[in-house]
Amino acid sequence: MDSKLLNYIEKGNPQPGTVRQMITRGAHVNGIDPNSNTILHLVMRHCCNKLEVVRVILNAGADIDAMNIDRKTPLLMAIEHCQDISVIIALIEHGANINCADKNNNTPLHFAVINERHSAIDVLLHFKADVSIRNSDGNSVVHLCVLKNDMQTLKKILQCEDLKIDIDAKNNLEETPLMSAVKVENLEIVRELLLVGASVRISGIRASTPLHAALKNSPTNMELVEELLWYNADVFDYDMDLLTPLHLALNKYYEKESDNLVFSKTLLKFVALRNGDRTDWISHHASARYDIIPELLKYYKMCLAEVCRMESELIHENISFYEFVIQGLNKRALLEKRIDYFTFNHILFVIKAYPIYRDIIVSCINKKYLSRKMMNIAFYTKQENGQKKFLDNDSVFIICGYLSNLEILNLIDAFSDFQP
């Protein structure tokens, strides 16, 4: 009778009445096939959306957490084989272990992320599935979100305040989720991880930091490098090859002179802002390897001069320009209520004295002030007949939504010189 029930289930369209009748006549609900699959396992694999059949089997005393030869439980198979969400909920409410793991230590949540089952992810998070468990590759579900480029699930997990998330857990490759995101150059996920506190200082294999990894990417993504620098990535960290991110940036100039030292200058610009005068270190540790250092030091001194000016210039009461920029770098809005529109206009005026840090300064400004400034300027397009067509404020506001702060500032500067 057990084999008849197993064969009936495998056909894929069992009826709850027939299953109940076969069980009543002696079929064992915990009987197994050669791969240790129970009837409940087979329902998950072969039958779509058979909630009533599942209930009949559960009510007959099926082992909810029985494991097959691959250590998969019915719940794991339900998620793997895309069962209806009502079946998954029924299994959990009947007592299924939501943190069970297969032979590769993948949990139901791992399977849900791997198979992009977003409705199942929602249910598992609702029932407080453990997000910290790592599979045999050492990957947590946060790692998997990065590898699957699943920003939707990543945000859900990170927003669960009552879940214990080790955002800096390493997998078997010694990679944190941030390191993995940097290596695949997923800027959006890198920003999300940094926003919730992922460390830019934790090193991976051969003592390489995320900034090392970003600079080793080819081609190198400047936005990615700058994002790490915003969160105070260390330019002077040595890896096991005795290379710092600054060395890697300098190497890019010698590999391709069209680089124009842009990466090296970007690193030094943040060093001057965050770490003050490190001229001695640069001269001692880099000059022997690179003949371009004297030119680079000239630029670095210009950076230091602008930082010194920031420290001495007040933009509002006892708030220095430097304090405003540093708090902006730290993604803190402590000055938000103390910086009014008048002060904003003052910042726009003095920003012209900071050509090197212009892009960083404008990134620290609230976009609503820049948009408001845009709407006070007469913007126009030229038609085919040469006449000017001026844009209304609604159009200008919509355009601002698609532009970065720096792009808005460039437009303000461009059109301010041509006002009627």
Image (cartoon, rainbow, N blue to C red):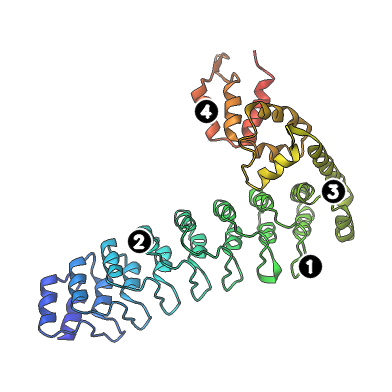
* In the depicted structure, whether residue 257 falls above or below residue 373: below
Amino acid type, callout 3: Leu
Which quadrant is home to the C terminus? top right
In primary-sequence order, the first of circles 3 and 1 is 1
Q: Quadrant of residue 408?
A: top right
Query: Circle 4 is placed at which residue position?
Result: 397
Query: In this image, 26 relative to 337: left or right?
Result: left
Secondary element type, mark 1 = loop
Query: Circle 3 is placed at which residue position?
Result: 296
Dots 3, 1 in contact, CB < 8 A: no
Query: Circle 2 is placed at which residue position?
Result: 123
In primary-sequence order, the first of circles 3 and 2 is 2
Amino acid type, callout 1: Leu
Query: Circle 1 is placed at which residue position?
Result: 242
Dots 1, 2 in contact, CB < 8 A: no
Q: Quadrant of residue 96?
A: bottom left
Dots 2, 4 in contact, CB < 8 A: no
